[in-house]
Image (cartoon, grey):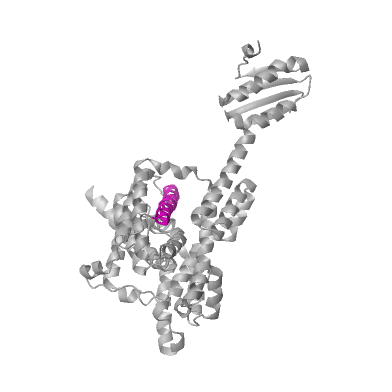
Amino acid sequence: MAQTITKNIIKYDLKASLVVFLVALPLCLGIAVASGAPPLAGLIAGIIGGVIIGVLSGSHVSVSGPAAGLTVIVLDSIASLGSFDLFLGTVVIAGLIQIILGFAKAGVLGYYFPHSVIKGMLTAIGLILIIKQIPHGLGWDKETMGLAQLESSSSFSEIWFAFQNFSIGAIPITLISLLILYFFDRPKIKAHKLIGIIPGALWVVVLGILTNKFYQIFLPDWTQSGKLLVNIPIARNLAEMASLLTFPDFSAINTSNFWIIAVTIAVIASIETLLSIEAGDKMDPEKRITPTSRELVAQGIGNSISGLIGGLPVTAVIVRTSANIGAGAKTKLSAIFHGVLIFILVLTIPEILNQIPLSCLAAILIMVGYKLAKPSVFIDEYLKGKSQFIPFIVTVIAILLTNLLVGIGIGLVVGFFFIIRANYHKTVTLSEDKGVYVLKLQKQVSYLNKAPLMKALESIPDGSEVLINATKAKFIDKDIEEILNNFISSSTQKSIDVKTKGFKYNLNEFH
């Protein structure tokens, strides 16, 4: 038995962990850069997501780490708080909030968010990722701008500045990287036994380093250097690495802004985790179910530890999870091993990581953004009808014009409006067949349904036959009972023959 387990670990989980590691490495670095955080912060989050959350999680196949969906929040939060140290404090608190949510059995809350709003959130994140990464793809160094310009610039003005101050060497790297990512996303390439075993993102990173080496020899003016490259502090041993860690600052804990950011991170990270876990369980060949509340506790512990040692917030992430399942992972050991591999890499070859041009990482994140916000997403939501499309597009626009939390709040209000509206109309229905009118009451018939009920009753002509069918109504409000009793008691005056099914007429109210 032990030999079989060991064989499965070597055959499946170790192989899968290598694939996940190759996918996670450029994403950890790219997400950190996109978030305005040190690249090391993304790698720390990848290690914590793999090792700590991997051990604590009840999921067999999901992988956790820094999430592209949180880049906007992290970027805005660091700017709002004024320092990365203060932001780390909010990450620690966000983790504690997630732990409380987990123990409160709040894992089921993910099922109550309308699909259209979640889809709108992911689409908006995709668009923002693309917008934010275009300057990096053009090789624009913000240090060339004055402080006044930086403080007054928006995302679109940054793109304008980037076109005016681009690095000629960055553009070929970005364009070729996008082509490689597109090429490696084709089903035939993914399924290829030799080429497909290494993900496109890793090919992009290798190509970026080699292209920059080519520039150094043949086109020195095109060389990417300084702020246009990844910059990870070099640690020769564990003691040196410990000295490079950034620790949280809680001096702003008594401010509302600090708590708003902490709650925002906790809520969005929890939503993204629950969605990724649900998707991962559906893809799991063995169809195992992850305990969602336990997952929130695991994520909360991971986030608190990540914040304490200088890492980005973490969530369960669908890209790495799908790569893990696709590579044949059988147990959570695959996720744990991938975190160990990142840790070993940071200690052994940081010099190589520091040769990666930011334009490669920009291309990777632009492709991630495109997958979240491609045109087919808009078309699919439109074809589902206005009750799905309007909350979706309102959420997208609201997030783009405000921020993630406010945008989701607006989207939820619109989404719940359509849900209530649908229930409002479906709870009371009136149909007619050969002169017989059937009034059906379904689900929970509350005072909110008074208007459609009265409208339906008023439309019934004199001399009709009416059947009031309430067999499917689990609850009927007293106001609704009164309206029906009034109708029945006055029906003889209009020569209306009323029969009831599942509803008891209370004659005593009128005598």
Where is 463 relative to 306, above or below?
A: above
Query: Quadrant of the image for the C terminus?
Result: top right
Instruction: From the top left corner, tell me how far across and down residue 301 is, in percent.
Output: 31, 51
Q: Nearer the viewer, residue 67 or 279?
A: 67
Please indicate whether residue 217 sits to the left or right of residue 2 in the image: right
Q: Quadrant of residue 454?
A: top right
Q: Which of the 4 quarters of the picture holds residue 356?
A: bottom left
Q: Is residue 495 left or right of residue 345?
A: right
Q: Tell me which secondary structure the magenta stretch mostly adopts.
A: helix
Q: Seen in the image, is 254 located left or right of residue 245? A: right
In this view, the residue farthest toward the front is 254
Q: How many marks?
A: 0
**Was residue 272 drawn as part of the magenta stretch in this picture?**
yes
Judging depth in this view, the residue of 79 and 444 nearest the camera is: 79
Residue 258, position as x, y percentages in the image: 40, 56
Q: Foreground residue, 503 or 182?
A: 503
Can residue 443 be seen in the rendering of this structure? yes
Q: Which residues are magenta?
A: 255-282
